Image (tube, grey):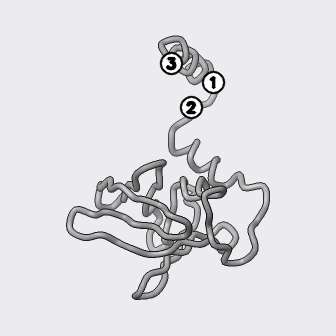
Amino acid sequence: MKILLFAALLFFTSCKDKVTVQDVLIIDCSNHNVDPPPLSIVNNENQNRLMCVWTEGSTENATLSILNDSIYYVEDNLMVPYHISGDSIKIIFPTHTYNGQFAFEKDTLVLIDAYGSSKYWPFRN
C-alpha cells in the first residue's frame, strides 16, 4: 500500500501541469466512447457514468459531484450517501430521502421523480 501511494505521489508530482481532482473528474465524464440511445435507462454496467461533476446550468458553478458512494452538493457544502438499484436512485439527505429514477439523454443526466424531472450536464470550467 505504501509503495502504491508513493508511486501515485511520484506520478502526480512529476507531471508538468498541475492536475486536480476536479480535472480528473471532468476528463472522466467527458470520455464516453459511445453515446447511448436517447433517454437510455441506466444499468449497473454504465453506472460509472454517474460519477462526474454536474451542473444544472443556472449558475456558472458546478451543482453536484457524484462519487462512488456519495454526492457532494457544492452550494450547500453537503455530502450525502446515495444508493442505486437498476435505474432507481435513493439519495439520503439529513432531513428527507429522495427517491427517483435516472437516465441519460446523450451526455445529459436526467433525474425523474413524482414531481417531474431535472437535467444536469457535465461541468466544464
Number of other residues with Cα within 10 Å of mark 1, as a class: few under 14, some 14 to 19, many 20 or more: few
Residue 28 to residue 47: above or below: above
Of 58 and 53, nearer the camera is 53
Callout 1 touching callout 3 (CB < 8 Å): no
**Are dots 3 and 2 in contact, CB under 8 Å?**
no
Label annotation for residue 18: 2
Residue at x 29% of width, y 60% of height: 76
| Residue topped by disc 3 | 5
Question: Quick one: label 3 or label 2, which is nearer the N terminus?
Answer: 3
**Could you tell whether 56 is left or right of 16 in the image?**
left
**Type of amino acid under label 1:** Cys
Circles 2 and 1 in contact, beta carbons < 8 Å? yes
Q: Write the residue at 63% across / 72% down.
A: 41
Identify which amino acid the numbered label 3 is placed on: Leu
User: Disc 2 residue type?
Assistant: Lys
| Helix, strand or loop status at disc 3 | helix
Q: Which residue is farthest front?
A: 85
Q: Secondary structure at mark 1?
A: loop
Q: Under tag 2, what secondary structure? A: loop
Residue 125, located in which quarter of the rendered image?
bottom right
Number of residues whose C-alpha sits closer than 10 Å to that of mark 3, classed few (under 14), some (14–19) or many (20 or more): few
Q: In the rendered image, which residue does mark 1 sit on?
A: 15
19 left or right of 100? right
